[in-house]
């Protein structure tokens, strides 16, 4: 580059300012502009605009190779800010009254979504003849969920679906998936050391779990009992009211940075810190106080996030895909088979939604039967004799015609089950299919550790199969999710898993 010789004469910590060359400017301008164009095209055709941005990243990075490694690293850092803001927005718009009741089911969904891909990976890689350690490394990567992609497609689906019962389940499951993926990642590096010092392996594995649980428990408690009363004092409130959006932005940036730092140094994912920072800020103001971090977000950060930071984030995912190394016959078919199994593994994460609906239907049917039996009992006012209806058939004929009856005919329950629950289960499963940045991160860390070790954690054939699966899942998952929302979004929104009943 033209500036390299002048940089050497600059003082430490500085660079010599010089005019960038036209090819440099043209490359960056083309990258940002074409990302917007590709996003609009992919959004219209496939209902998943992020695929266009990933494609631009692949073209400019591994295919054309017209970006230097330092540039791509810079875009990766800037794009990660976009990822942090996506997750932060999810926490900022979260409603605890609807999120907390869905958390137990979200944990079950996350557990299924982690265990099934790992189990299927072990089975398939055994058939491929890959080592067991390769299966563990690749399964750890594909057990993850792209938190940024999940929150992005959920926001694109509409604000009402984001706060629906099934939307809250999805948020919780995606967060837990990433925490588990981080735990599994913490195991891979010690394993690649060839079984060296394993005295601290227990703490290495347990640290992310303890840190995540501690942050998830401590944040709501400190927010409700310490920071919210302080924030709502008359003096602090008046300062915030006078400062307007500028004061809200200052507090918001400070809180976000604080949570990111705590999460990073505690040993858990910074994305959990971003989510908790959003929740923390949303819980501080009084409902009618005029102080609104959401309004500040929409005024100051949303345009930058939507048109600059988020596109760069998805572009940076495209940088990470070794596109030219994927195209041999053996790698293609093995990668495709693995991608199909990994899609099925996450789709099965919607199974707990179906089981929960079946349990609720059975519980409701039991209550309806008890109600019908109580109504079928007739007592003679002049005696203590109890008279029952002749048989169940007569009761079933009478119960539907009685006003105010709680019984719902079985055929209607079945129709509502097919109408509401199956789309909701598919909603969760498809949204979790994309692996994106987290899957690539785990695969590349495992592969890098293997390159520096005499005991490889992830061989090249297994790595390429994993990359195939991550790429296909990240491409097809949002497409299928967009089609589902397009056709069944309204049905989910107004159904039993929508916003009206909060999943009850």
Image (cartoon, helix red, strand yellow):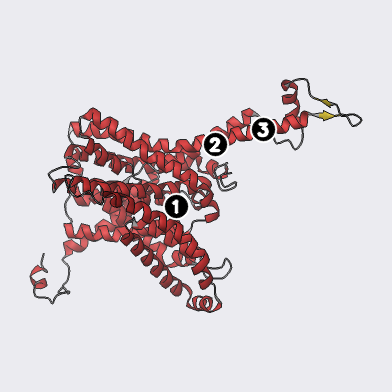
Q: Residues within 10 Å of mark 3 (few under 14, many from 20)?
A: some
- Give the label, 3 or 2, closer to the camera: 2
Q: Residue furthest front?
A: 199
> Residue sitting at 26 percent across and 39 percent down?
136
Name the residue: 46% across, 67% down: 296
- Residue 408 badge: 3
Residue at mark 3 to residue at mark 1: CA–CA distance: 35 Å
- Please provide percent x and percent y for residue 258: 37, 67
Q: Is residue 111 above or below residue 182?
A: above
Callout 3: helix, strand or loop? loop
Name which of mark 3 and mark 1 comes first in the sequence.
1
- Examine the rendering and report whether any part of residue 387 can be seen: yes
In depth, the one of 288 and 225 nearer the eye is 225
Circle 2 packing at 10 Å, graded few (<14), some (14-19), many (20+), is: many
Asked whether the residues under the numbered discs 3 and 1 touch, taking CB atoms below 8 Å apart as contact, a structural biologist would say: no
The residue singled out by tag 1 in the image is 155
């Amino acid at each position: 580059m033209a500036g390299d010789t002048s940089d050497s004469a600059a003082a430490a910590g500085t660079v010599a300012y010089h005019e960038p060359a036209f090819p440099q400017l043209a490359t960056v301008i083309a990258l940002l502009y074409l990302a917007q164009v590709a996003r609009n095209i992919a959004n219209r055709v496939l209902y998943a605009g992020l695929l266009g941005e990933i494609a631009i990243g692949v073209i400019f990075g591994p295919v054309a190779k017209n970006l230097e490694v330092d540039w791509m690293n810079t875009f990766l850092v800037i794009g990660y800010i976009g990822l942090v803001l996506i997750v932060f927005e999810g926490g900022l718009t979260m409603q605890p009254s609807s999120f907390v009741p869905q958390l137990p089911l979200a944990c079950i969904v996350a557990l299924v979504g982690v265990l099934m891909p790992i189990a299927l990976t072990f089975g398939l890689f055994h058939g491929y003849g890959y080592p067991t350690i390769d299966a563990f490394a690749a399964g750890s990567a594909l057990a993850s969920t792209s938190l940024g992609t999940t929150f992005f497609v959920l926001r694109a689906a509409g604000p009402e679906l984001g706060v629906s019962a099934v939307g809250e389940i999805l948020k919780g499951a995606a967060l837990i998936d990433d925490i588990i993926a981080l735990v599994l990642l913490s195991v891979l590096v010690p394993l690649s050391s060839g079984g060296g010092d394993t005295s601290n392996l227990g703490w290495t594995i347990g640290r992310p779990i303890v840190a995540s649980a501690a942050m998830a428990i401590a944040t709501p408690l400190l927010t409700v009992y310490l920071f919210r009363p302080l924030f709502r004092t008359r003096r602090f409130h008046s300062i915030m009211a006078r400062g307007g959006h500028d004061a809200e932005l200052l507090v918001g940036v400070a809180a976000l940075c604080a949570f990111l730092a705590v999460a990073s140094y505690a040993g858990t994912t910074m994305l959990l810190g971003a989510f908790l920072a959003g929740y923390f800020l949303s819980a501080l103001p009084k409902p009618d106080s005029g102080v609104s971090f959401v309004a500040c977000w929409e005024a100051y950060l949303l345009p930058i996030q939507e048109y600059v930071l988020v596109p760069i984030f998805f572009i940076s995912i495209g940088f990470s895909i070794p596109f030219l190394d994927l195209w041999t016959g053996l790698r293609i078919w093995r990668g495709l088979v693995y991608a199909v199994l990994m899609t099925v593994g996450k789709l099965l994460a919607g199974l707990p939604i179906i089981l929960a609906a079946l349990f609720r239907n059975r519980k409701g049917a039991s209550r309806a039967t008890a109600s019908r039996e109580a109504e079928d009992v007739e007592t003679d006012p002049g005696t203590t004799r109890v008279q029952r209806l002749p048989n169940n058939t007569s009761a079933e004929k009478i119960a539907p015609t009685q006003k105010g009856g709680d019984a719902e005919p079985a055929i209607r329950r079945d129709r509502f089950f097919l109408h509401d629950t199956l789309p909701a289960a598919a909603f969760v499963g498809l949204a979790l299919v994309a692996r994106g940045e987290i899957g690539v991160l785990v695969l590349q860390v495992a592969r890098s550790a293997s390159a520096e070790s005499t005991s490889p954690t992830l061989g090249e054939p297994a790595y390429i199969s994993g990359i195939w699966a991550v790429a296909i899942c990240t491409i097809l998952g949002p497409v299928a999710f967009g089609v589902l929302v397009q056709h069944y979004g309204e049905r989910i929104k107004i159904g039993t898993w929508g916003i009206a009943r909060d999943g009850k």
